[in-house]
Image (cartoon, rainbow, N blue to C red):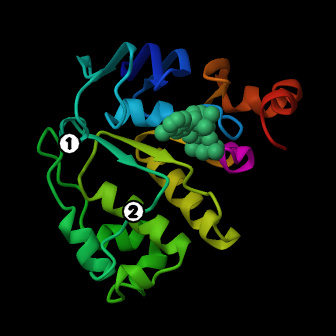
Amino acid sequence: MSAVLEVSGLEVFYGASQILFGIDLKIEQGQTMALLGRNGAGKSTTMKAIAGVVAPRAGRIAFGGKQMAGMKPYAVARLGLAYVPEDRQVFPEHTVRDNLLIAAKKGPQGQDEWTVSRIWQVLPLLERLRDRPAGRLSGGEQQALVIGRALMGNPTMLLLDEPSEGLAPIVVSSIGDLLRALRAQGATVLIAEQNMHFCLGVASDAVVIDKGKIVYRDNIAGLRENAEVRSQYLAM
Ligand SMILES: Nc1ncnc2c1ncn2[C@@H]1O[C@H](COP(=O)(O)OP(=O)(O)OP(=O)(O)O)[C@@H](O)[C@H]1O
Ligand SMILES: [Mg+2]
């Protein structure tokens, strides 16, 4: 297996306060990696640094072997790394279908596997909402839409920041179904989550972040059995 994304020694500051203290992460082709940690641990900051939204003070970020620390978000996206932030922004006046079509583009190697009809297959809850303005969707439906929109760009890898946060159990379960389907198709995904139970059902591997440092890494079965790490670093 080859590393799709390799982060090493990542340090991020907001003003004078240091938030990340040398994060190392390696994600292989086909892995669904959970980045778990409590509130304020540094999950979103890690995702933002990878996506180019915040500039790291130090460290390396290699994607497909190409150095990209300090690149702008559009340049990172063009390399095939799709970032879905926490805030679930849709084009509110446009229909669900148009929100997907606006995002359609070929992947970095010309991939065009994703079509609107394939999105309906993997996110069936969206199909019956196809003609609804996206601004009138529930939070969960918007979450499904922003993930669908990311897929329409045929990315090589997905970064999802707290996809299950604040959602009704039924929507969490359809997003879980989608992530399992993507994993079965060989997708490479990094998911930041506080919700360990959600990750136990969808991820292949896990890292735990606490106070801006990685404190644990293993496959998902290892985390499931490690009650000590779960109680020390994760909300139960
Ligand atoms: N723009 C900012 N300016 C200053 N400090 C910030 C900023 N954004 C985040 N922080 C701080 O950085 C730390 C890490 O925040 P981050 O959002 O990465 O945590 P998180 O693990 O994603 O938490 P959550 O689970 O609540 O989303 C927190 O202490 C937070 O208060
Ligand atoms: Mg966060």
Q: CA distance from mark 1 to mark 2?
A: 17 Å
Q: Determine if the magenta segment contains residue 12.
A: no
Q: Is residue 99 above or below residue 128?
A: above
Image x and y of residue 115, in percent = 24, 66
Give the image quarter of residue 126.
bottom left
Position of the C terminus, as image quadrant, is top right
Q: Nearer the viewer, mark 1 or mark 2?
A: 1
Image x and y of residue 17, in percent = 55, 22
For residue 146, the mark is 2
Bounds of the magenta span?
Answer: 194-200
Please state the total of marks drawn on the protein image: 2
Q: Badge 2 local density, few (<14 within 10 Å), some, or many (20+)?
A: many
Residue at 28% in and 45% down: 155
Comparing 163 with 135, the one in front is: 135
Q: Is residue 39 above or below residue 84?
A: above
Image x and y of residue 190, in percent = 48, 37
Mark 1 or mark 2: whose residue is earlier in sequence: 1
Residue carrying label 1: 74
Element assignment for label 2: helix
Q: Is residue 4 above or below residue 203?
A: above
Comparing 189 with 94, the one in front is: 94
